[in-house]
Amino acid sequence: GISILWFRRDLRLEDNAALYHALKSNYPVLPLFIFDKNILDKLPKTDARVTFIYDTISNIKQELQSAGSDLLIKYGKPEEVWPEVLKTYEVKEVYTNHDYEPYARERDDNMVEFLTSEKIAFKTFKDQVIFEKGEILKADKTPYTVFTPFYKQWQAKLNDFYTKPYPTKKYFKNLFQTKSLPLPTLMEMGFERSELEFPKLNYKNKLAHYAKERDYPALDSTTRIGLHLRFGTLSIRKAAQDAIDAKSTVWLSELAWREFYMMIIWHFPYAATDSFKKQYDKIKWRNDEKEFKAWCEGNTGYPLVDAGMRQLNETGWMHNRVRMVVASFLSKHLLIDWRWGEAYFAEKLLDYEMASNVGGWQWAAGSGNDAAPYFRVFNPELQMKRFDPKFEYIKKWVPEFGTKKYAQPMVEHTFARERVLKVFKEALS
Ligand code: FAD
């Protein structure tokens, strides 16, 4: 018999909790990755993240081959792939890492049922966060819904134990030895190779100046590790330890924001699609399709908004300060449902993370955790003057800025502000 290590969003061989435990089990370990049709069928054929996953998986496959083993790769729906796998191999145990999103939970609940009926153990581990689920709770054992006290406890609890890497390589001799297994091509799965450039993992030199520079979109001062945390090509334990070593508490707190939102999605899965504060779902959004299109394309006439949207469209990434501004502009100035913006980001962002994206959008719309009160409406002109005073970021992404060709503001700020206050007040009082 064998153990299977099922990779999902933990695509690395070093410091991987489930892989470590699998390698210490009583059976040789065969790693598996499923290109999940339930997810892939909804994506555009040029989705860059699929290329990233594909290349990562190919590298892992090679590394495993040089250890005499291999990566079993399947393309299909997990519920159909698994019975096939069990026909080919005598599987005794399945090891995998926790996954907190609603789809993943449903998939894993079904797995437990299926594997139990086959008398196979399903063993799961915490890997993608430092603290998960109910590890950080209020004194009354309920989850935090506000970041600051959550972070206080998160930081107090953090010590070397939680950042220690899992020494997987030491146990590679316990990998299942096999002749080489096939690798489907991207094309066979209906995808095209994306030419987008993926951020490299060389973030350490950013940490020293992060606190001072992170809010200025013209500076390349943030680490761009979002994609790597999303797919597990970087271990969160390593990132947290690097933050501690560099004494960058501000950056450490950003990693905690990520965990805060994952904790929220775990305890309040409804907030993946509904407003966290439910009365916000009474808001009468205008949802004007033409205005939505102008926002998507970066033609609103507000330079900071347009620069951000064009950066997103061209590179698959947008600076955090600008994400806040464009999200506020869509939900408040244009009164378009935050879910439209959330879905657009989900399609475009390389670092798309459901929990953080929904969290960020609801924060901007006012419906979420720790959100600014609804009557605080970002002024995109003031934000630009404050955070891009020399228009460096703007000029990079909006070359026609300052010329006659540049669009007029699609809505006047004071008018938009009064309109949103009225509409929100009606829904919320
Ligand atoms: P850095 O500033 O270097 O931070 C390091 C890491 O910390 C990030 O990669 C991320 O994992 C985490 N982090 C930082 N800020 C936040 C935050 N506010 N919330 C949660 N995690 C954070 N982040 C995503 O990872 N995926 C998303 O889909 C996403 N959508 C967002 C949508 C909106 C409307 C807003 C306002 C923010 C969103 N964020 C999202 C948070 C933040 O903008 C990005 O994490 C950050 O800009 C990514 O760049 P970086 O990797 O250089 O981050």
Image (tube, rainbow, N blue to C red):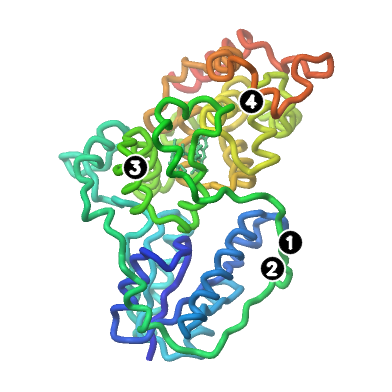
Q: Amino acid at mark 3?
A: Ala
Quadrant of the rendered image containing residue 335: top right
- Mark closer to the chain start, 2 or 4: 2
Position of residue 34 measured from the top left corner of the image (x, y, whole percent): 54, 71
Left or right of residue 202: residue 171:
left
- Mark closer to the chain start, 2 or 3: 2
- Name the residue carrying label 3: 243
For the point 65% across and 49% down, the residue is: 197
- Name the residue carrying label 1: 192
- Mark closer to the chain start, 1 or 2: 2
- Mark closer to the chain start, 4 or 3: 3
**The residue tagged with tag 3: helix, strand or loop?**
helix
| Crowding at mark 2 (Cα within 10 Å: few <14, some 14-19, many 20+) | some
Quadrant of the rendered image containing residue 251: top left
**The residue tagged with tag 2: helix, strand or loop?**
loop
Answer whether residue 12 is visible to the viewer in this image.
yes
Q: CA distance from mark 4 to mark 1?
A: 31 Å
- Name the residue carrying label 4: 393
Disc 1 to disc 2: CB gap under 8 Å: yes
- Name the residue carrying label 2: 186
Q: Nearer the viewer, mark 2 or mark 4?
A: 4
Answer whether residue 117 is visible to the viewer in this image.
no
Label disc, if present, on residue 342 of the rendered structure: none
The quadrant of the picture occupied by the C terminus is top left
- Mark closer to the chain start, 3 or 1: 1
